[in-house]
Image (cartoon, grey):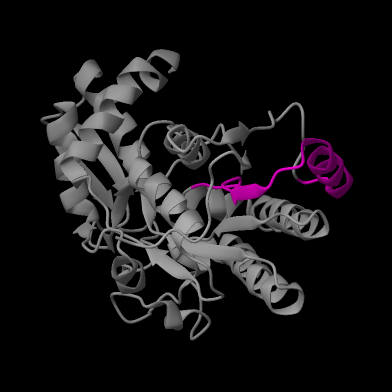
Protein backbone atom coordinates (compact mmCIF):
# COMPACT_ATOMS: atom_id res chain seq x y z
CA UNK A 1 0.00 0.00 0.00
CA UNK A 2 1.46 3.33 -1.09
CA UNK A 3 1.87 5.95 1.62
CA UNK A 4 -0.36 9.02 1.22
CA UNK A 5 1.79 12.15 1.22
CA UNK A 6 -0.84 14.67 0.08
CA UNK A 7 -4.47 14.58 1.22
CA UNK A 8 -7.29 15.73 -1.06
CA UNK A 9 -9.87 15.68 1.73
CA UNK A 10 -11.57 19.02 2.15
CA UNK A 11 -9.47 20.72 -0.55
CA UNK A 12 -10.69 22.75 -3.50
CA UNK A 13 -9.66 20.76 -6.59
CA UNK A 14 -9.94 22.38 -10.02
CA UNK A 15 -10.25 20.00 -12.96
CA UNK A 16 -9.37 22.09 -16.00
CA UNK A 17 -11.13 20.58 -19.01
CA UNK A 18 -13.86 18.87 -16.98
CA UNK A 19 -16.19 18.39 -19.95
CA UNK A 20 -13.69 16.39 -22.00
CA UNK A 21 -13.27 12.64 -21.85
CA UNK A 22 -10.31 12.77 -19.45
CA UNK A 23 -11.54 15.65 -17.33
CA UNK A 24 -15.00 14.16 -16.83
CA UNK A 25 -13.44 10.86 -15.79
CA UNK A 26 -11.26 12.65 -13.21
CA UNK A 27 -14.35 14.42 -11.86
CA UNK A 28 -16.11 11.05 -11.49
CA UNK A 29 -13.13 9.62 -9.64
CA UNK A 30 -12.74 12.63 -7.33
CA UNK A 31 -16.33 12.22 -6.12
CA UNK A 32 -15.05 9.57 -3.70
CA UNK A 33 -12.31 11.81 -2.24
CA UNK A 34 -14.46 14.14 -0.10
CA UNK A 35 -13.02 17.23 -1.77
CA UNK A 36 -14.68 20.28 -3.33
CA UNK A 37 -14.53 19.96 -7.12
CA UNK A 38 -14.17 23.22 -9.06
CA UNK A 39 -15.02 23.48 -12.75
CA UNK A 40 -15.22 26.27 -15.32
CA UNK A 41 -17.48 26.02 -18.35
CA UNK A 42 -16.04 27.00 -21.72
CA UNK A 43 -18.41 29.97 -21.94
CA UNK A 44 -17.27 31.10 -18.51
CA UNK A 45 -13.51 30.89 -19.01
CA UNK A 46 -11.28 30.83 -22.09
CA UNK A 47 -8.14 29.01 -20.94
CA UNK A 48 -6.15 30.56 -23.79
CA UNK A 49 -6.48 34.04 -22.27
CA UNK A 50 -3.93 34.60 -19.49
CA UNK A 51 -5.69 37.48 -17.73
CA UNK A 52 -8.96 35.56 -17.65
CA UNK A 53 -7.31 32.48 -16.18
CA UNK A 54 -5.56 34.48 -13.47
CA UNK A 55 -8.75 36.35 -12.56
CA UNK A 56 -10.80 33.16 -12.35
CA UNK A 57 -8.20 31.39 -10.22
CA UNK A 58 -7.83 34.38 -7.90
CA UNK A 59 -11.60 34.32 -7.36
CA UNK A 60 -12.03 30.55 -6.91
CA UNK A 61 -8.71 29.89 -5.11
CA UNK A 62 -8.07 26.23 -6.06
CA UNK A 63 -5.67 24.37 -3.78
CA UNK A 64 -5.14 21.52 -6.25
CA UNK A 65 -5.17 21.64 -10.07
CA UNK A 66 -5.45 18.79 -12.58
CA UNK A 67 -4.79 19.96 -16.15
CA UNK A 68 -6.87 17.77 -18.44
CA UNK A 69 -7.71 20.60 -20.83
CA UNK A 70 -6.08 20.33 -24.25
CA UNK A 71 -6.66 20.64 -27.97
CA UNK A 72 -6.66 17.00 -29.05
CA UNK A 73 -7.39 14.94 -32.16
CA UNK A 74 -6.25 12.17 -34.45
CA UNK A 75 -3.85 12.18 -37.39
CA UNK A 76 -6.20 14.08 -39.72
CA UNK A 77 -6.88 16.85 -37.19
CA UNK A 78 -3.19 17.20 -36.29
CA UNK A 79 -2.15 17.32 -39.91
CA UNK A 80 -4.72 19.87 -41.07
CA UNK A 81 -4.82 22.20 -38.01
CA UNK A 82 -1.21 22.38 -36.76
CA UNK A 83 -1.37 26.04 -35.72
CA UNK A 84 -4.34 25.36 -33.42
CA UNK A 85 -2.65 22.35 -31.87
CA UNK A 86 0.58 24.12 -30.97
CA UNK A 87 -0.88 27.52 -30.03
CA UNK A 88 -3.87 26.40 -27.98
CA UNK A 89 -1.97 23.78 -26.00
CA UNK A 90 0.94 26.09 -25.27
CA UNK A 91 -1.44 28.83 -24.14
CA UNK A 92 -3.56 26.58 -21.91
CA UNK A 93 -0.68 24.99 -20.05
CA UNK A 94 1.35 28.21 -19.75
CA UNK A 95 -1.57 30.20 -18.34
CA UNK A 96 -2.63 27.60 -15.79
CA UNK A 97 0.83 26.58 -14.56
CA UNK A 98 2.04 30.17 -14.20
CA UNK A 99 -1.12 31.25 -12.39
CA UNK A 100 -0.91 28.21 -10.11
CA UNK A 101 2.57 29.31 -9.04
CA UNK A 102 1.49 32.93 -8.48
CA UNK A 103 -1.43 31.82 -6.28
CA UNK A 104 0.53 29.21 -4.32
CA UNK A 105 -1.44 26.16 -5.46
CA UNK A 106 -0.41 23.23 -3.26
CA UNK A 107 -0.40 20.51 -5.92
CA UNK A 108 -0.68 20.46 -9.70
CA UNK A 109 -0.85 17.54 -12.12
CA UNK A 110 -0.11 18.09 -15.82
CA UNK A 111 -1.01 15.39 -18.33
CA UNK A 112 1.34 14.92 -21.25
CA UNK A 113 0.92 12.34 -24.01
CA UNK A 114 2.69 9.23 -25.24
CA UNK A 115 3.20 10.95 -28.61
CA UNK A 116 5.98 13.10 -27.12
CA UNK A 117 8.42 10.24 -27.50
CA UNK A 118 10.62 9.86 -30.61
CA UNK A 119 9.02 8.14 -33.59
CA UNK A 120 11.52 5.28 -33.49
CA UNK A 121 12.04 5.03 -29.74
CA UNK A 122 12.90 1.62 -28.29
CA UNK A 123 9.83 -0.31 -27.19
CA UNK A 124 8.39 -0.27 -24.60
CA UNK A 125 9.30 3.40 -24.21
CA UNK A 126 10.88 4.43 -20.91
CA UNK A 127 10.63 7.98 -19.62
CA UNK A 128 14.32 8.47 -20.43
CA UNK A 129 13.51 8.24 -24.17
CA UNK A 130 12.11 11.78 -24.11
CA UNK A 131 14.05 14.17 -26.40
CA UNK A 132 16.38 11.46 -27.69
CA UNK A 133 15.24 11.49 -31.32
CA UNK A 134 12.96 13.01 -34.00
CA UNK A 135 9.23 13.17 -33.30
CA UNK A 136 6.48 11.55 -35.35
CA UNK A 137 5.82 14.12 -38.14
CA UNK A 138 2.03 13.75 -38.09
CA UNK A 139 1.68 15.05 -34.53
CA UNK A 140 4.87 16.98 -33.85
CA UNK A 141 3.11 20.30 -33.16
CA UNK A 142 0.98 18.75 -30.43
CA UNK A 143 3.96 16.81 -29.07
CA UNK A 144 6.16 19.92 -28.83
CA UNK A 145 3.45 21.76 -26.90
CA UNK A 146 3.08 18.84 -24.49
CA UNK A 147 6.85 18.61 -24.00
CA UNK A 148 6.85 22.29 -23.08
CA UNK A 149 4.23 21.60 -20.40
CA UNK A 150 6.34 18.81 -18.93
CA UNK A 151 9.37 21.08 -18.85
CA UNK A 152 7.36 23.85 -17.20
CA UNK A 153 6.40 21.59 -14.31
CA UNK A 154 10.04 20.66 -13.80
CA UNK A 155 11.18 24.30 -14.12
CA UNK A 156 8.69 25.66 -11.57
CA UNK A 157 9.58 22.86 -9.17
CA UNK A 158 13.31 23.58 -9.58
CA UNK A 159 13.14 27.38 -9.32
CA UNK A 160 10.19 27.91 -6.99
CA UNK A 161 9.79 24.60 -5.14
CA UNK A 162 6.28 24.03 -6.52
CA UNK A 163 4.80 20.56 -6.05
CA UNK A 164 3.94 20.29 -9.74
CA UNK A 165 4.01 16.78 -11.23
CA UNK A 166 3.58 15.39 -14.74
CA UNK A 167 2.20 12.11 -16.06
CA UNK A 168 2.39 10.64 -19.56
CA UNK A 169 -0.82 8.73 -20.47
CA UNK A 170 -0.93 6.22 -23.27
CA UNK A 171 -3.70 6.20 -25.92
CA UNK A 172 -7.06 6.68 -24.22
CA UNK A 173 -10.66 5.76 -24.97
CA UNK A 174 -13.94 5.56 -23.08
CA UNK A 175 -17.13 7.46 -22.18
CA UNK A 176 -17.13 11.02 -23.42
CA UNK A 177 -14.80 10.35 -26.35
CA UNK A 178 -14.97 12.44 -29.53
CA UNK A 179 -16.68 10.56 -32.35
CA UNK A 180 -16.39 13.32 -34.98
CA UNK A 181 -14.51 11.56 -37.81
CA UNK A 182 -12.74 14.81 -38.71
CA UNK A 183 -11.06 15.02 -35.29
CA UNK A 184 -11.37 11.65 -33.55
CA UNK A 185 -8.71 9.15 -32.51
CA UNK A 186 -8.64 5.60 -33.79
CA UNK A 187 -10.96 3.87 -31.26
CA UNK A 188 -13.94 6.23 -31.58
CA UNK A 189 -13.40 6.55 -35.34
CA UNK A 190 -13.48 2.78 -35.87
CA UNK A 191 -16.42 2.40 -33.49
CA UNK A 192 -18.48 5.08 -35.25
CA UNK A 193 -17.63 3.74 -38.71
CA UNK A 194 -18.38 0.14 -37.75
CA UNK A 195 -21.66 1.09 -36.10
CA UNK A 196 -22.75 3.08 -39.13
CA UNK A 197 -21.80 0.21 -41.45
CA UNK A 198 -23.81 -2.26 -39.35
CA UNK A 199 -27.00 -0.21 -39.30
CA UNK A 200 -26.78 0.74 -42.99
CA UNK A 201 -25.78 -2.75 -44.18
CA UNK A 202 -22.46 -1.59 -45.64
CA UNK A 203 -20.07 -4.43 -46.44
CA UNK A 204 -16.77 -2.68 -45.70
CA UNK A 205 -15.18 0.01 -43.56
CA UNK A 206 -12.13 2.04 -44.60
CA UNK A 207 -9.16 2.40 -42.26
CA UNK A 208 -6.28 4.80 -42.78
CA UNK A 209 -2.86 3.17 -43.17
CA UNK A 210 -1.80 -0.45 -43.32
CA UNK A 211 -3.28 -1.69 -40.05
CA UNK A 212 0.14 -2.87 -38.86
CA UNK A 213 1.07 -0.16 -36.30
CA UNK A 214 0.75 -1.29 -32.70
CA UNK A 215 -0.84 0.80 -29.98
CA UNK A 216 -1.48 0.55 -26.26
CA UNK A 217 -5.00 1.53 -25.17
CA UNK A 218 -6.15 2.53 -21.68
CA UNK A 219 -9.73 2.95 -20.47
CA UNK A 220 -10.12 6.56 -19.37
CA UNK A 221 -11.47 5.72 -15.91
CA UNK A 222 -8.26 3.81 -15.23
CA UNK A 223 -6.31 6.94 -16.10
CA UNK A 224 -8.50 9.00 -13.76
CA UNK A 225 -7.74 6.56 -10.95
CA UNK A 226 -4.02 6.87 -11.72
CA UNK A 227 -4.28 10.68 -11.61
CA UNK A 228 -5.83 10.65 -8.15
CA UNK A 229 -3.25 8.10 -7.01
CA UNK A 230 -0.39 10.33 -8.19
CA UNK A 231 -1.85 13.46 -6.59
CA UNK A 232 -1.98 11.66 -3.25
CA UNK A 233 1.12 9.46 -3.40
CA UNK A 234 3.75 11.06 -5.65
CA UNK A 235 5.97 14.13 -5.55
CA UNK A 236 9.01 14.45 -7.80
CA UNK A 237 10.43 16.10 -10.90
CA UNK A 238 10.54 12.93 -12.99
CA UNK A 239 7.69 12.28 -15.40
CA UNK A 240 5.73 9.05 -15.04
CA UNK A 241 4.33 6.92 -17.84
CA UNK A 242 0.75 5.69 -17.35
CA UNK A 243 -0.06 2.64 -19.46
CA UNK A 244 -1.48 -0.87 -19.32
CA UNK A 245 1.65 -2.80 -20.31
CA UNK A 246 0.43 -4.43 -23.55
CA UNK A 247 -0.48 -3.37 -27.07
CA UNK A 248 -2.43 -4.55 -30.14
CA UNK A 249 -2.15 -3.88 -33.85
CA UNK A 250 -4.72 -1.62 -35.49
CA UNK A 251 -5.99 -4.72 -37.35
CA UNK A 252 -6.49 -6.52 -34.04
CA UNK A 253 -8.21 -3.47 -32.58
CA UNK A 254 -10.56 -3.30 -35.59
CA UNK A 255 -11.48 -6.95 -35.07
CA UNK A 256 -12.29 -6.38 -31.39
CA UNK A 257 -14.41 -3.35 -32.19
CA UNK A 258 -16.26 -5.27 -34.91
CA UNK A 259 -17.13 -7.97 -32.36
CA UNK A 260 -18.36 -5.43 -29.83
CA UNK A 261 -20.42 -3.49 -32.37
CA UNK A 262 -21.71 -6.52 -34.24
CA UNK A 263 -20.25 -5.52 -37.61
CA UNK A 264 -19.64 -8.57 -39.81
CA UNK A 265 -18.23 -6.93 -42.91
CA UNK A 266 -14.64 -6.35 -43.98
CA UNK A 267 -12.05 -3.66 -43.30
CA UNK A 268 -10.36 -1.99 -46.28
CA UNK A 269 -6.95 -0.50 -45.50
CA UNK A 270 -5.62 2.61 -47.25
CA UNK A 271 -1.83 2.23 -47.37
CA UNK A 272 -1.40 5.63 -49.04
CA UNK A 273 -2.61 7.27 -45.81
CA UNK A 274 -0.19 7.80 -42.87
CA UNK A 275 0.28 5.12 -40.23
CA UNK A 276 1.85 7.33 -37.58
CA UNK A 277 4.47 5.78 -35.27
CA UNK A 278 5.15 2.09 -36.06
CA UNK A 279 4.64 1.19 -32.39
CA UNK A 280 3.75 3.08 -29.22
CA UNK A 281 3.95 1.12 -25.98
CA UNK A 282 4.92 2.73 -22.68
CA UNK A 283 7.18 1.30 -20.03
CA UNK A 284 5.10 2.02 -16.92
CA UNK A 285 7.46 0.31 -14.50
CA UNK A 286 7.96 3.42 -12.36
CA UNK A 287 4.24 3.76 -11.70
CA UNK A 288 3.79 0.05 -11.11
CA UNK A 289 6.60 0.15 -8.54
CA UNK A 290 4.66 2.86 -6.67
CA UNK A 291 1.73 0.47 -6.32
CA UNK A 292 -0.71 1.33 -9.13
CA UNK A 293 -1.77 -0.65 -12.20
CA UNK A 294 -4.68 -0.54 -14.66
CA UNK A 295 -7.66 -2.85 -14.11
CA UNK A 296 -9.84 -2.67 -17.23
CA UNK A 297 -9.33 -5.23 -20.01
CA UNK A 298 -9.50 -3.82 -23.55
CA UNK A 299 -12.57 -5.83 -24.61
CA UNK A 300 -14.48 -4.81 -21.47
CA UNK A 301 -13.53 -1.18 -21.92
CA UNK A 302 -14.64 -1.21 -25.55
CA UNK A 303 -18.02 -2.65 -24.55
CA UNK A 304 -18.47 0.09 -21.96
CA UNK A 305 -17.45 2.71 -24.54
CA UNK A 306 -19.93 1.37 -27.08
CA UNK A 307 -22.73 1.44 -24.50
CA UNK A 308 -21.96 5.11 -23.91
CA UNK A 309 -21.82 5.76 -27.65
CA UNK A 310 -25.24 4.18 -28.19
CA UNK A 311 -26.74 6.25 -25.37
CA UNK A 312 -25.14 9.53 -26.44
CA UNK A 313 -23.08 10.05 -29.58
CA UNK A 314 -24.97 7.67 -31.89
CA UNK A 315 -28.27 9.46 -31.21
CA UNK A 316 -26.66 12.84 -31.83
CA UNK A 317 -25.18 11.61 -35.12
Q: Is residue 158 left or right of residue 220?
A: right
Residue at 15% over, 29% down: 263
* Residue 96 in sight from this viewpoint: yes
Residue at 55% over, 53% down: 78
Q: Nearer the viewer, residue 281 or 107?
A: 107
Residue at 59% over, 38% down: 10
Residue 106: % across, % down? 67, 56
Q: Is residue 221 left or right of residue 11?
A: left
Residue 52 magenta: yes
Q: Nearer the viewer, residue 94 or 186?
A: 94
Q: Which region of the structure is painted magenta?
A: 48-73
Residue at 48% over, 60% down: 113
Q: Quadrant of the C terminus?
A: top left
Residue 151: % across, % down? 64, 73
Residue 89: % across, % down? 66, 54
Q: Quadrant of the N terminus?
A: bottom left
Amino acid sequence: MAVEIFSLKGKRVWVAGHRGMVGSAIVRRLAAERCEILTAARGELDLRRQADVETWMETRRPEVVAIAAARVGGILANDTRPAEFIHDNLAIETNIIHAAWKLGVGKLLFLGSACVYPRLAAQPMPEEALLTGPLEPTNRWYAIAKIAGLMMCQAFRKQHGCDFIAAMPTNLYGPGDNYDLRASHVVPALMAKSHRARITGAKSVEIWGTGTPRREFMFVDDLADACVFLLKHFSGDEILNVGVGSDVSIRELAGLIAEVVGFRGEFTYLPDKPDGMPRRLLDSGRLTALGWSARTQLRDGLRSSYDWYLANAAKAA
